[in-house]
Amino acid sequence: NAGVTQTPKFQVLKTGQSMTLQCAQDMNHNSMYWYRQDPGMGLRLIYYSASEGTTDKGEVPNGYNVSRLNKREFSLRLESAAPSQTSVYFCASSVTVLEAFFGQGTRLTVV
Amino acid sequence: RKEVEQDPGPFNVPEGATVAFNCTYSNSASQSFFWYRQDCRKEPKLLMSVYSSGNEDGRFTAQLNRASQYISLLIRDSKLSDSATYLCVVMTTDSWGKFQFGAGTQVVVTP
């Protein structure tokens, strides 16, 4: 049972480089999320997609773009990485408001 | 002010003891409440939902106090495996579908 799969698990970028974090879920969930987690800050919502074809900004969307490619996949793009984007990124999905299922996270360092 | 606040701890608990901690939320439109557990360098996972009347799941008891706007988690007969960070999660009617996370309370159970 794969659940929510994120790639890559680790990444080091130089300032100004771009990259896309991939997320896929096999649970037929409508809602998908991208969070970042920083020490002492908890998880903060970057973008949210309630269903295929829709996306909505969360608490900290600046510097990020997303694509809900289909029901399964929700990608997060950093166009020009900055050191402030060093964080752990989690993708999650849910079918109801009762529970979110998380991927294993991507540890991103921007130098 | 953060919408969801938690004492970061750590709460150092002898094995077999009881530990309890709270989470306060600022938005009176909050409707759904959860406790998630996050092990070190792992993804968050749902521990339990919190119902208005309070609820138990084995050694874990969750309570909701709407008047004072806080939820609590009590762990009885603590096990070494209970060592983790416990995340308080709230969903509000004006941001339905978006989970809002507290920064977490760290619990360390010692032999």
Image: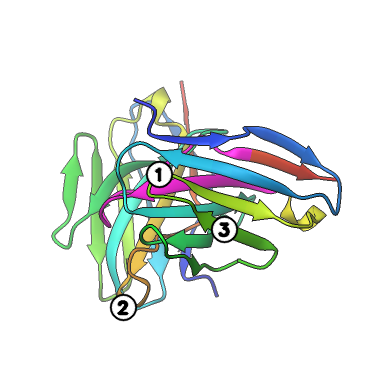
Which residue does the numbered mark 1 point to in the structure image? Answer: A72
Task: Left or right? Give the position of A10 relative to A92.
Answer: right
Query: What segment carries the magenta color?
Result: A87-106
Gap between marks 2 and 1 measured at Cα: 31 Å
Q: In the depicted view, which residue is nearer to us: A35 or B109?
A: A35
Residue linked to disc 2:
B29
Q: Name the residue located 18 percent from the left edge and 58 percent from the top edge.
A: B51
Q: Looking at the picture, how far across and down is residue B64, in whole percent? A: 25, 62
Disc 2 chain ID:
B
Secondary structure type for disc 3: strand
Tell me residue A110's x, y (percent): 80, 46
Subunit bearing disc 1: A
Q: Residue A107 carries which label?
A: none
Which residue is drawn at the image coordinates 86% and 51% (left, top)?
A15
Q: Residue furthest left?
A: B53
Specify the amino acid type for callout 1: Arg
Residue A93 vs residue B57, the one in the foreground: A93
Residue denoted by label 3: A66
Q: Picture coordinates of residue A69 (x, y %)?
A: 48, 51
Disc 1: CA contacts within 10 A as few (<14), some (14-19) or many (>=20): some
* Kind of residue at badge 3: Val
